[in-house]
Image (cartoon, rainbow, N blue to C red):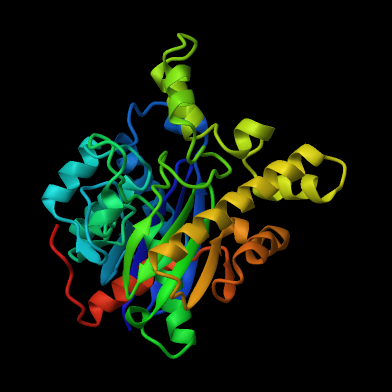
Amino acid sequence: MFKILVINPGSTSTKFAVYHDEESVFQKTLRHQGEELAPFSTVAAQYEFRKETILKALKEENIPVDFDIIVGRGGLTRPVVSGVYEVSEDMRKVLLSAEYGEHACNLGGLIAADIAKEIGCKAVIADPVVVDELQDVARISGHPELPNISIFHALNQKAIARRFAKENGKKYEELNLIIAHLGGGVSVGAHNFGKVIDVNCALGGNGPFSPERVGTVSATGLMNLCFSGKYTKQEVKRMLVGNGGLMAHLGLNDAYQVEQRAESGKDPHAALIYDAMAYNVAKEIGAMATVLKGKVDAILLTGGIAYGKGFCKYIEDMVGFIAPVKVYAGEDELGALASSGLRVLNGEPTLKY
């Protein structure tokens, strides 16, 4: 039996779990209040604090810090192909410096590496958000200084793809799939025989709007807003990521609350915005169907918003003619991380960063 510790840091929480092979034996979400994180000038500066909260929680549960591998959620590094990467010193430096961007997921590899060094085991990350398997033609935009880039929910999309393949007696590498991750950000990927050859940039890039992100907007409109003199760069950044999407339209980033308002029949504006979000997701799925030249085995909807039956039905009504639609509501990123660690322990080689 292998013992695996998995770590998934978020902006205001740290989720972690202990697995014995594929079985979760302990899971916990540590919530971090604003005043706890306020003293840290950067996200990377939090990693020692967050590491200690994990170790304290394990001690309180009498769980020995004795693991065969520690798996952290992958952060913003240079673009990489899908796979499991050992946390090297070079990767640690990149995550600490936030050279490719600052995000809470950067802490996963840092915390994993620190604990692994203390107990003498391997630390890895798996399918980070910067997985890049785009075909060359998908990288080209209307200006060479603004190429299309791949930042998306690679971990969950790849895990759901493998799950669907297993359920249908296939290998992931044998299928053409369109997968929509529906969460705080939305990413829609075209999976072509095991590679995501096209996907919208879910972190402040393009594609459907989401509970907190604007998705694709008018370039001219954005330019005029930026040079209006009304907003700082930081304020515009918050408009694009954090205060965009449902938050901008309705003052809420909770899709469930918006769904309740929409379905009550008393808030037609909320209903329109909620429908518009589903409409944009469906439109992006349609675009990805052309990437796969219409040869699509299935369309998979996943993430927290996929719990919304009306939301998923709206999408299915628009795209069901392309391929069968299957819903995998929620996400199991901890389980996906544990599975990646187990594959390494069972002999799958890690990739070098």
Q: Of residues 261 and 13, which is closer to you in this image?
A: 261
Residue 326: horizontal and vertical position, in percent?
Answer: 58, 74
Instruction: Judge from the rendering whether residue 178 lies leftward or rightward of residue 325; answer left or right.
Output: left
Residue 32: horizontal and vertical position, in percent?
Answer: 49, 40
The correct choice, above or below, for 313 with respect to 115 in the image is below
Residue 182: horizontal and vertical position, in percent?
Answer: 54, 55
Q: Image quadrant for the N terminus?
A: bottom left
**Could you tell me which residue is drawn at 30 percent across and 49 percent down?**
75
Instruction: Judge from the rendering whether residue 127 lies leftward or rightward of residue 286; answer left or right.
Output: left
**Could you tell me which residue is drawn at 54 percent across and 39 percent down?**
212
Q: Of residues 10 and 263, which is closer to you in this image?
A: 263
The correct choice, above or below, for 139 with respect to 155 in the image is above
Q: Of residues 264 and 149, which is closer to you in this image?
A: 149
**Could you tell me which residue is drawn at 29 percent across and 64 percent down?**
70
Residue 27: horizontal and vertical position, in percent?
Answer: 49, 64
Q: Quadrant of residue 304?
A: bottom right
Residue 156 appears anywhere in the view: no
Q: Residue furthest bottom?
A: 169
**Could you tell me which residue is drawn at 39 percent across and 68 percent down?**
292
Q: Of residues 234 and 336, which is closer to you in this image?
A: 234
Residue 25 appears anywhere in the view: yes
